[in-house]
Image (cartoon, helix red, strand yellow):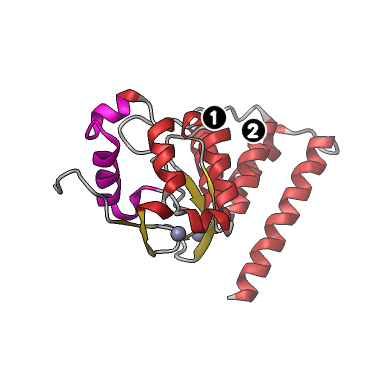
């Protein structure tokens, strides 16, 4: 641990440049005024000590130098609106490139989206985005599916239809057809439900066909 004293420079996680204290003015004032006392105690108890600690976290603390803020590569976060305890809040937001955990593509987590996550939806500051939009959507419906399957009511045709739609989106055609059979058993031929299941059946057949021809 460096001795608290004159601070030389801090590496801005947004532009990657080493910036003297005079070019980190916004960040330093944010630490002084936006971080609650209890958080100070977790750290070193003084601003310079906190700066060293934050700097030592490398890229784990989101802040930006004055140049990045002025040039709008980044904008200031509002720690008071964020949910944090022993992990530093987001002092600034800048676009991040993230590799999707599921499909491996690189996607952008924009600064506006981040502010929405941490200050409107108020997710914990350490909650990171790990999936791209489409994998995130898939993950959401997978969760919904396991919720439905944990306590199924096969007399509830709306539920059966939802299960079929999800199976279809997940490309689980065989399972979708099984549920189609369950749904058909319970409906009255010619009813609105019948037409709904008919349309689902068509969708499954078409999806299966496109999937096979694209392979
Ligand atoms: Zn910068
Ligand atoms: Zn993905």
- Above/below status of 118 relative to 132: above
What SS does tag 2 mark?
Answer: helix
Badge 1: residue crowd in 10 Å (few <14, some 14–19, many ≥20): few
Ligand 2 contact, mark 1 (Cβ < 8 Å): no
* In the rendered image, the vertical position of residue 126 relative to residue 158, given as above or below: below
User: For this view, does 13 lie left or right of residue 93?
Assistant: left
Q: Who's the residue at 51% across and 41% down the image?
A: 77
What quarter of the picture does the C terminus occupy? bottom right
Mark 2 and 1 residues: CB-CB less than 8 Å, in contact?
yes
Is 81 a magenta residue?
A: no
In the rendered image, residue 14, in percent from the top left (x then y), is placed at: 45, 59
Main secondary structure along the magenta-highlighted residues: helix
Which SS class for mark 1?
Answer: loop
Q: Nearer the viewer, residue 136 or 170?
A: 136
Q: Label 2 to label 1, Cα distance in Å?
A: 8 Å
User: Which residue is identified by label 2?
Assistant: 159
- Labelled disc at residue 152: 1
* Looking at the image, residue 113 lies above or below residue 161: below
Span colored in magenta: 38-61
> Is residue 54 located in the magenta-colored stretch of the structure?
yes
Which mark is first along the chain, 1 or 2?
A: 1
């Amino acid at each position: 641990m460096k001795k608290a004293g004159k601070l030389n420079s801090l590496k801005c996680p947004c532009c990657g440049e080493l910036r003297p204290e005079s070019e980190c003015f916004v960040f330093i004032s944010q630490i002084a005024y936006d971080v609650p006392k209890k958080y100070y105690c977790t750290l070193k108890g003084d601003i310079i000590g906190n700066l060293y600690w934050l700097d030592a976290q490398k890229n784990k603390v989101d802040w930006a130098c004055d140049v990045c803020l002025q040039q709008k590569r980044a904008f200031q976060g509002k720690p008071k609106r964020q949910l944090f305890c022993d992990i530093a809040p987001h002092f600034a937001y800048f676009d991040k490139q993230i590799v999707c955990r599921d499909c491996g593509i690189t996607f952008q987590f924009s600064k506006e989206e981040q502010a929405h996550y941490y200050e409107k939806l108020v997710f914990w500051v350490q909650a990171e985005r790990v999936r791209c939009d489409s994998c995130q959507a898939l993950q959401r419906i997978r969760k919904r599916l396991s919720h439905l399957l944990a306590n199924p009511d096969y007399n509830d045709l709306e539920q059966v239809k939802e299960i079929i739609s999800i199976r279809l989106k997940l490309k689980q055609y065989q399972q979708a057809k099984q549920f189609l059979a369950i749904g058909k058993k319970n409906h009255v031929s010619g009813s609105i439900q019948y037409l709904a299941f008919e349309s689902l059946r068509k969708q499954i057949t078409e999806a299966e066909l496109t999937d096979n021809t694209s392979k």
